[in-house]
Amino acid sequence: LFLKTKNKIPQKSWQGRRTGEYASVPKKEKKRERKFSRVLFWLLLLGFLGICGYILLFSPYLDVDAISVEGNQDISNREIEDRVMESIEGKYFNFFPKKNFFFVNEKNINAALKNNFDQLEVASIEKRFPGTISIRVTERKPELVWCSGGVCYFVDKDGLAYGGATGTDEELRETGFLTIIDDSAVPVDLGKTKINPDYIGFIEAANGMLRNDLKLDLAESFHTAGMASGEISVKNGEGWTVKLGSEFSIEDAKKVIQTLFEKELNEEVRKNLDYLDLRIKNKIYYKIKQAEENNSAE
């Protein structure tokens, strides 16, 4: 009885099932299933990346279709927008679209605007996802016209020669531009040649002093021996030439000329005046044509 009862002791429930499960799944089949899962995963990942790549590179939804321009005054938004859109037309290597948001090149846009608009200075170019380019610009204003070798150029307040001026110096002067003729005829390199801003300020101050304080009508453009000379001369409506140098402050020059007009060079005498020279500090020279002799005062 005892032996029979011992043989009938039930086994643990997990013992048979666990041994059976592991025995029923061969190791080779497991490896095959894992390999298939990995291949499927990579195929799905590559497919997903391919779709994303196509959307990013070729989808028309990412084409730049809006241009925002700020800071312009004389140049219209439409003109600037047209030049920008022209600069992003076409494809790189006949394959990648230039107008795609990710392929838009800010340097190309900057170059296109500078090549088409001399007076335009680009402050910033910013891409705004998904299809907008924001451009901030400033417009240079001509402070004066510099003519050299028969060609005239616009110069801004910082002294940079930034654009060609259409017309002769006389035509430009008649339209209200302050014009200076460089008698040295040194060539001007647009975008690179720069005149000292202090010299520009000196010329403007001299122009104001002669016209407004001394009430002289200027009969021609200002002349200079060169942009580094610091000197200017101009013939006025009375027929004589005034020569000024930056060593003589404009305020001091005004006082000296006013004193000369009161004491020595009245209107009658000035009819025969050839020139009045204030280029050397503390020295004033003038020449009377009739007497054909030089006079000086220190």
Image: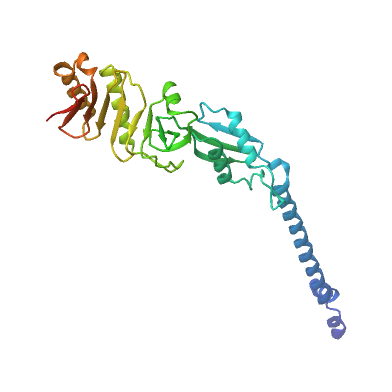
Quarter holding the N terminus is bottom right
The residue lying toward the viewer, choosing from 96 and 213, is: 213
Q: Where is 65 relative to 17, above or below?
A: above
The residue lying toward the viewer, choosing from 35 and 60, is: 60
Residue 135 in percent (x, y) is at 54, 36
Residue 121 in percent (x, y) is at 48, 37
Residue 106 in percent (x, y) is at 57, 44
- Residue at x 44% of width, y 35% of height: 150
Does residue 281 appear in this view? yes
Q: Where is 27 relative to 122, above or below?
A: below
Quarter holding the C terminus is top left
Q: Quadrant of residue 14?
A: bottom right
Does residue 10 appear in this view? no
- Residue at x 84% of width, y 73% of height: 29
Residue furthest to the bottom: 3
Q: Where is 55 relative to 72, above or below?
A: below
Residue 85 in percent (x, y) is at 64, 38
